[in-house]
Each structure stands twice: as C-alpha cells, then as structure tokens.
Image (cartoon, grey):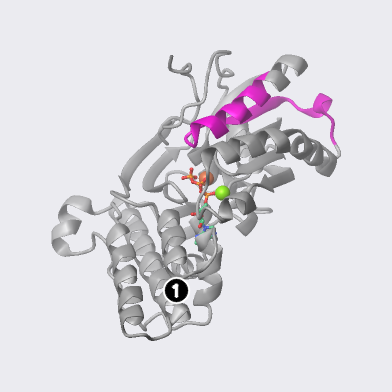
C-alpha cells in the first residue's frame, strides 16, 4: 500500500510517502530556528508553525514522489505522544484530508514510528522478530522488547528523569553551544578527549542494577557537567568545551549501549534496533556497532535523516497497520499527548 504519513508532534512538520518498505518522499520543515533563542521548543510557536508549513510540506512530498493524492491508499498521522497543541494541528489537517479524499485514516504512535524508520533502510531485509529496541529521543529513553511492532511491544525500562536527547540539549546550553544540543555536542566532541573527565553512568552501580537494570538516569550526569563548568568559572579558566562535550557524549553512549546489550543478552534476543534523534549521534552509533559486533548481536540503525522527527517514519508505521489488517482509527480519535509505546494505533477519543 502507498501510505502518506503526517508528523507534527514537536517542532518538525513532516510529510512522508512510503510504498510498503520503500521510501518515496520525505519532506520536513522545521521551526527549530524560531525556538533557538528560547533554548527549547515553545509549544504555541511550534503549533502555529505547523499551520503555516503543512500545505507546502504536503505539496513538496507529493512532488518529490511524483504522485498525486489519487495515488495514495491510506493516510497516517501522529496521534501522540507529543505536544498537545502541535499534535492537534496534524490530526486536524489529516482528518480534513481524509474527509476530502475518502481515504482511510490511521492515528499512529510517534514512538513506534521512530522504530519503524529502520524498515526504510534501503536494500536490506527486515530485521527478524523478536528484537530489542532502544528508543532514544528528545522526550523518551526506553528499552523495549518487540515481538511485533503493531501488536506486541513490552517496555523493559526507561529513564527515571531526563531523556537522553533532553540531556544533550541541557548540557549544550551549559557549554554555550546552540540548540538543538545533540548535533552541536556531536560536532564539538569530535575535537575533544572522551577520557578527559570521568562522568557518572546513571543507574549502573550493582545496587542500582538490581532494581533498575534497564532503566536510565541522566540528571546526575547533567549535574556533574554543571559542576565542572562552575569549577572552571570559579577558577577563571576557559571552558574546555570539546573535552567536556566528548566526555559527556561518551558517558551517554556508554550507558545506552551497555544496557541495550544487556537486554539482548538477558532476553536471548540477538537483534537490536535503534530509533529516535539520539540514534543520529556519531558515538552512539559507533559504540553500538562495536559492542554488538563483539556480542554477536545484529544491529539496525535508521539512516541519519530518518532518526529525528519526519513524516516517512509515520508513513512506515501506518503501512505496518495496513499490512496487519487493522481497521482505520475511529473518526473521533484525537491527539493523545501521552500515548504509550505499547499502543501502535490511537483508538481513544479526545478527553473532554
Ligand atoms: P520524542 O520522539 O520523544 O517525542 P522528539 O520528537 O522531540 O521527542 P526526536 O526528534 O526524536 O525527539 O529527537 C530530537 C532530539 O534528538 C533532541 O533532543 C536532539 O538534541 C537529539 N539529537 C539530534 N541529533 C543528535 C545527535 N547527533 N546526537 C545526540 N542527540 C541528537
Ligand atoms: Mg525536533
Ligand atoms: Fe520524536
């Protein structure tokens, strides 16, 4: 089936088109620059930007695929999780489009989309099930066991405080790097020494592992970086930004990959798939490759531009629902800002 996917959960307006597992178009507009001066996404600004960007982004996706709406078999839209106001713009636009075209409409889970992005990797056979998924994004850091992305996902663990992407954004601010923090830290870290500072690996002590084997914590790491920044300030010394960035990035990559591999080994599932914006991180990708190779685990990572928010990943998730024979979402489905990763499809209505 040819599926058009619409994404508006945060600050990217995305429209993507897939045919089965083949990527036909991926148009993304971002309001990132408008948020940069605030150091983070401003929900109202993001929602307004989606209203402006939706139609042009839809047009450029159709142009890129050289298709018209007549060629589309189904529409998928992010129903959640995400910023409520931003989600509502996409859901409203998708409902209008479905009504006008008569196409079936699926409200899909944004997080399932992040994992489904990997399916669009060109020329590779799909990763066998079951597999372990590491979802690392701006709002989530979760380890999941995927028996079936549509019907059977279980949560093994998640962050107990900040998400990994959030930690990148906060630490970038501490280091005077721009927003979003992930790419800025990646660039700065390339010039630094990852062994310069030994930053904490959250929830990795034996006593923590007993209860939080697959959970993450990044707030202590952020505080440790803040203390170092203060110490250099107090001493009147220039900040060694590259070394701090490299050491921070190493701590995040180390704990993410260590716990993901532990989950694979413990569950006897030698397959790992990454998803989410932080999966674009150079060191996370490198360390995951190294450690998976050592442990005999097959690793799948989405192409870089499909790691951060986009419409193609939503179309891919929609295509899975269509393939699974799922009925379209009820007409009254709404944005669900807290939709859990265990629900691939939105079936609930807006809360009153
Ligand atoms: P969620 O998917 O949980 O709703 P989100 O949609 O805001 O959150 P994504 O678009 O998946 O998140 O990812 C954005 C996050 O990824 C930001 O926090 C950003 O800093 C981070 N990120 C992007 N590129 C990189 C990178 N190269 N290294 C580390 N982090 C990165
Ligand atoms: Mg974003
Ligand atoms: Fe996301």
Q: Nearer the viewer, residue 137 or 70?
A: 137
Is residue 79 covered in magenta? Answer: yes
Q: Which residue is mark 1?
A: 245
Residue 303 x, y percent position in the rendering? 62, 57
Q: At 44% across and 61% down in the image, what residue appears?
A: 168
Q: Decide if residue 295 is in sight here.
A: no
Q: Is residue 162 above or below residue 152?
A: below
Q: Decide if residue 35 is in sight here.
A: yes
Q: Quadrant of residue 229?
A: bottom left
Q: Quadrant of residue 101?
A: top right
Residue 76 x, y percent position in the rendering? 63, 29
Q: At 34% across and 63% down in the image, what residue appears?
A: 222
Residue 286 x, y percent position in the rendering? 49, 70
Question: What segment is highlighted magenta in the picture?
Answer: 67-95
Graded by Cα atoms within 10 Å as few (under 14), some (14 to 19) or many (20 or more), the crowding at tag 1 reads: many
* Quarter of the image that includes the C terminus: top left
Q: At 51% across and 68% down in the image, what residue appears?
A: 177
* Quarter of the image that includes the N terminus: top right
Q: Nearer the viewer, residue 351 or 5?
A: 351
Q: Residue 197 vs residue 21: left or right?
A: left
Query: Most extreme residue toward the left, as rendered?
Result: 207
Residue 320 x, y percent position in the rendering? 58, 33
Mark 1 residue element: helix
Q: Residue 294 vs residue 50: left or right?
A: left
Q: Is residue 160 above or below residue 48?
A: below
Q: At 29% across and 65% down in the image, what residue appears?
A: 223
């Amino acid at each position: 089936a040819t599926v058009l996917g619409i994404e508006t959960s945060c600050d990217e307006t995305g429209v993507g088109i897939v045919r089965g597992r083949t990527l036909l178009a991926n148009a993304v507009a971002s309001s990132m620059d408008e948020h940069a001066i605030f150091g983070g996404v401003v929900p109202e600004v993001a929602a307004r930007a989606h209203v402006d960007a939706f139609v042009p982004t839809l047009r450029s996706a159709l142009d890129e695929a050289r298709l018209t709406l007549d060629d589309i078999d189904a529409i998928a839209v992010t129903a959640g999780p995400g910023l409520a106001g931003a989600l509502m713009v996409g859901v409203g636009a998708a409902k209008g489009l479905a009504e006008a075209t008569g196409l079936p409409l699926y409200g899909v889970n944004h997080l399932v989309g992040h994992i489904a992005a990997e399916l669009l990797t060109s020329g590779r056979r799909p990763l066998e099930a079951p597999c372990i998924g590491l979802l690392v994004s701006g709002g989530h850091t979760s380890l999941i066991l995927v028996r079936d992305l549509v019907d059977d996902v279980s949560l093994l663990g998640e962050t107990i405080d900040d998400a990994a992407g959030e930690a990148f954004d906060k630490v970038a601010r501490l280091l005077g790097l721009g927003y979003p923090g992930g790419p800025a830290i990646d660039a700065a870290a390339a010039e630094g020494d990852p062994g310069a500072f030994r930053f904490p690996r959250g929830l990795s002590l034996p006593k923590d592992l007993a209860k939080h084997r697959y959970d993450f914590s990044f707030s202590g790491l952020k505080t440790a970086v803040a203390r170092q920044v203060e110490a250099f300030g107090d001493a009147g010394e220039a900040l060694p930004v590259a070394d701090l960035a490299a050491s921070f990035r190493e701590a995040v990559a180390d704990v993410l990959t260590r716990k993901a591999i532990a989950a694979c080994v413990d569950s006897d599932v030698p397959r790992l798939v990454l998803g989410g914006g932080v999966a674009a991180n150079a060191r996370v990708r490198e360390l995951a490759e190294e450690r998976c190779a050592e442990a005999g685990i097959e690793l799948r990572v989405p192409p870089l531009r499909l790691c951060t928010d986009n419409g193609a990943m939503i179309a891919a998730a929609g295509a899975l629902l269509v393939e699974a024979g799922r009925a379209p979402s009820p007409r009254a489905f709404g944005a669900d800002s807290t939709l859990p990763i265990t629900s691939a499809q939105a079936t609930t209505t807006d809360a009153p």
